[in-house]
Image: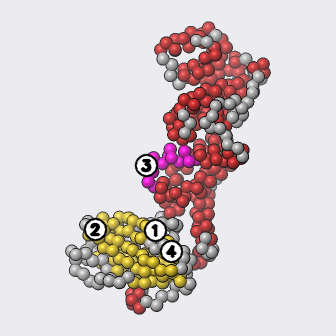
Amino acid sequence: MDIRNYWPFKKDSYSQFELLIGPHLNQLYKLAYRLTGQRDDAEDLVQDLLLKLFPRLQEMQQIELLSPWLTRVLYRLFIDGIRRQQRSPIDLMGDDEIAYEIHASTIAGPAEAASTELTNELINHALYKLSDDHRLLLVLHDVEGYSLQEINDMTDIPVGTIKSRLCRGRQKLREIIQLQGT
Amino acid sequence: MKCEHINQAIDDFLEQNLNRQDLVDFKNHVSECQACADKLELSRVLAAGLRQLPVAQPSAGFRQRVFAQVRSQYKTEHRQGYGYTRFAAGFASALVVSLAIWFVTNLYVPDTLVDQPQMISVAMHQTQNVRLSFDAQRNFQQVQLSIDLPANIELDGFPGQKTLSWQTSLVKGQNILTLPVFATAYGQGELQAQLRYGDKLETFRILLKANADGVQHNPLNKARSA
């Protein structure tokens, strides 16, 4: 007599979850690192994300393109964290505000700055002097290479606003770099 | 082109979004304006630097750690919610009960039909294996097997899921399906197993009664216990 075990879920929900999320983990960590700028913070962010996602396993199993969905949830989680930390909502949809006042008189000449060796440390330092609004868009677009439309899908910020903020963010970044070069 | 428009123009130039006329204007301007030419050069260098910013590798064991934490947290929550913390011990000592259900379709000679749902007692807050036995008269491919659980019963590892369904095959003879059931509340309810093969559908029901000790007194089950 043939006897077979017909319980197909040798891998339980936890294992299914790992199989589903595992292929995206490096990408999620990388994005988390770009958003937080710190390894420990990035790891914590990904951990928080996974803890929130596990109860949604069945929902995730129905999602055709999981990667953009995951990056969107990660981004939202990060923004929620910033809001909690600041105890006041950051304005992601409002007018561009320049958070750092740079006085023209203190800025080195463009030629001097251009000749400055732009080390990773220098760029990173400058990035984290930007306002969150500008920095997040710069790391998503200029560092990670997400398209404007992908960023729009992730953040719900209109494409036109993304473009103008990127422009302002780059301008501010150049100014900070020039200032640091003095 | 004027200097005050150079920032957006530089972005558009670097992303190759300038139309032919704007490109001519842009090139003419930066060839004549040293300040804007320097700004363009800095923008080029900065854009290249941003694309090459390294990512610190996660700490050793990161992958294992995050998934272990998920398992740990939800396992703990699942058990703590029912005031049960010694999961491992409970699983090891789980009472194994079995139930024989005969798989019959109109195409095959009936053996035994289950007219009334059989009852199995399960102990609260302990994972117990309930084994369902399907006796097939021949091999079957592409059989849809569905399990519907009563409100007070879960399957271990599948918190909150009341229905599971999957494709399987049956071999001629006895086919065993082991369900790791977990009672979350007192009371009884009906576990339903459905086998669909083509346009044939067989539904089997058993009553699961959750009580304190899981002692069962049903003679039918006793006769068929493994």
Amino acid on which disc 3 is placed:
Glu
Q: Which residue is label 3 attached to?
A: A64
Q: Does B172 sit left or right of B74 as displayed? A: left
Mark 4 to mark 3: distance in Å?
32 Å
Magenta span has A70? Answer: yes
CB atoms of marks 1 and 3 within 8 Å: no
Which colour assignment does the render follow? Answer: secondary structure
Image quarter for residue B219? Answer: bottom left
CB atoms of marks 4 and 1 within 8 Å: no
Which mark, by number, is residue A100?
A: none
Q: Position of residue A57 (x, y in %)?
A: 50, 58
Name the residue: 69% across, 48% down: A84
Q: Which residue is label 1 attached to?
A: B162
Q: Position of residue B87 (x, y in %)?
A: 59, 74
Q: Position of residue A116 (x, y in %)?
A: 71, 23
Report crowding for label 1: few under 14, some 14 to 19, many 20 or more residues within 10 A (C-alpha): some
Q: Which residue is label 4 attached to?
A: B152
Question: Do discs 4 and 3 belong to a common subunit?
Answer: no
Q: Position of residue B171 (x, y in %)?
A: 30, 73
Image quarter for residue B191? Answer: bottom left
Choose between B151 and B204: the one closer to the eye: B151
Which SS class for mark 2? strand
Name the residue: 32% across, 82% down: B114
Which mark, by number, is residue B197?
A: 2
Viewer-nearest of labels 2 and 1? 1
Please state the extent of the stretch shown in magenta in the rendering: A61-74
Q: Chain of mark 2?
A: B
**Position above or below: B121 against A118:** below
Residue B27 seen by the camera: no
Q: Does B110 sit left or right of A85 as displayed? A: left
